[in-house]
Amino acid sequence: MAINKLELAERLAKIRDKMHEENFNALIIYSDEYRSGNTTYFTDYKPINVIEESPQVIFVVEDADPVVMIGRLNSFAAKETIWIDDVRPIHEIDQHLDSIFKPIKSKNPKIGIIGDNLLPVKTFNSIKNNLPEAKFVSCGEMLSEIRAIKSPAEIELMRKAASINDYVLSKIVNKCKVGMTEVEVAAEAEYLGRKMGADIGSATVIMSGPNTNYPAWRPSQRKIQEGDFVMIDFNPSYEHYCNDSGFTILMPGSSDAKKKSVVSCHNIIKEIVPLIKPGTSSLTVYEYMLERLEPLGYSDNFTPYVSGRRGVGHGVGLDVVEDPDLNSSLDFEIQPGMTLAIKLDLHNIESQGSRIEVVTEITEDGNIPMNKLILEESNDYSIL
């Protein structure tokens, strides 16, 4: 089910075309193990951190063959498995830059950088020192535009990741008990996902009780108590492609107010996902949520948390969180081929918070949800 060599080569051709359109002499494409999408998109190789950091950088210089530089230990497997022939260890970068940039050394080149938010200062300084007359320009949006529209092969892998997540969530509902620690719940989710053939797309987030009011939280030794919200945000990947779905379990002994909020969030997600269509503004996702939450009295629990990054959702693909971003202020046209996580968070419900999230594929005339469980089960499914 992996992405084939032809598709990988076509991706490189697309980014090279964009490079020429923008009059760049070269592109430097960088990523690391945790946010590997920029380079894994072209190599289909995701580094692993053994006893080293796990950088991966691709140099695209005019029409020359691409060069991949990667962590020393990862380079052994990369040379054997990726389709690009020229793979070099990045700890020797200073020895290789002259040959890599030879076609443009006599120019005052314009160099585009994709992944400059991740690129280490030390690596950038090596490149800058080798090309002292170069102009460096951040151009990550060039690749984001390409990655935002998924191919049929990508969709197939993402659907597999979604089915694994649905299975894990369906089992966690029955395994989550009062007295378990957050770490124990995370262990159950990751064990089930691994058994189904998944990798871990990003850190498993398990938050309980007062910890659910944080936007993010590393699973702790806190024991789950009666009446707690327990937020489950598990993100499996399959052949590098991710899913981002989750919900909030409400433990026995909870108040009617908490029960109402859970039922309301499940119902709203079921109502609005079918309404998301191509050719419409991304702001409609926020507007659909707000117009349903306001009459229920949840506006203050919702609106303060949706103006920033991924307020009501985001793109999903090789990275759990990637462009485009969905929030209350960013306006773009939803397009066929996008794969979007639709997320509804409420906070300060009796000093706790909840989240529900599903991923859907935008089609030519609507959308097809990748995650089925939340949309098919009853609105009180996660109330124990």
Image: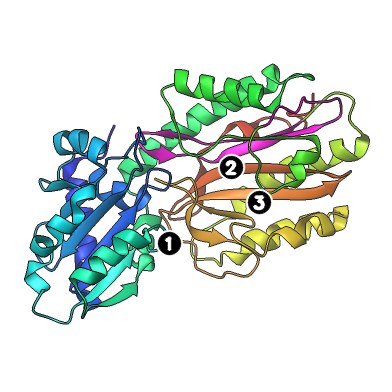
At x 63%, y 55%, the residue is 312
Within 10 Å of disc 1 (Cα), the crowding (few <14, some 14-19, many 20+) is few
Q: Position of residue 19 (x, y in %)?
A: 23, 70
At x 81%, y 39%, the residue is 210
- Give, as a single range, the part of the protein colored magenta: 220-249
Q: Is any atom of residue 144 visible in this view?
A: yes
Whole-angstrom CA distance, mark 1 to mark 3, is 34 Å
- CB under 8 Å between discs 1 and 3: no
What residue is disc 1 on?
A: 117
Residue 123 falls in which quadrant of the image? Answer: bottom left
Q: Position of residue 191 (x, y in %)?
A: 52, 20
Q: Secondary structure at mark 3?
A: helix
* Amino acid type, label 2: Val
Q: Which callout, 1 or 3, points at the residue further toward the start of the chain?
A: 1
Q: Position of residue 45 (x, y in %)?
A: 27, 40
Q: Which callout, 3 or 2, points at the residue further toward the start of the chain?
A: 3
Whole-angstrom CA distance, mark 3 to mark 2, is 11 Å
**Label annotation for residue 358:** 2
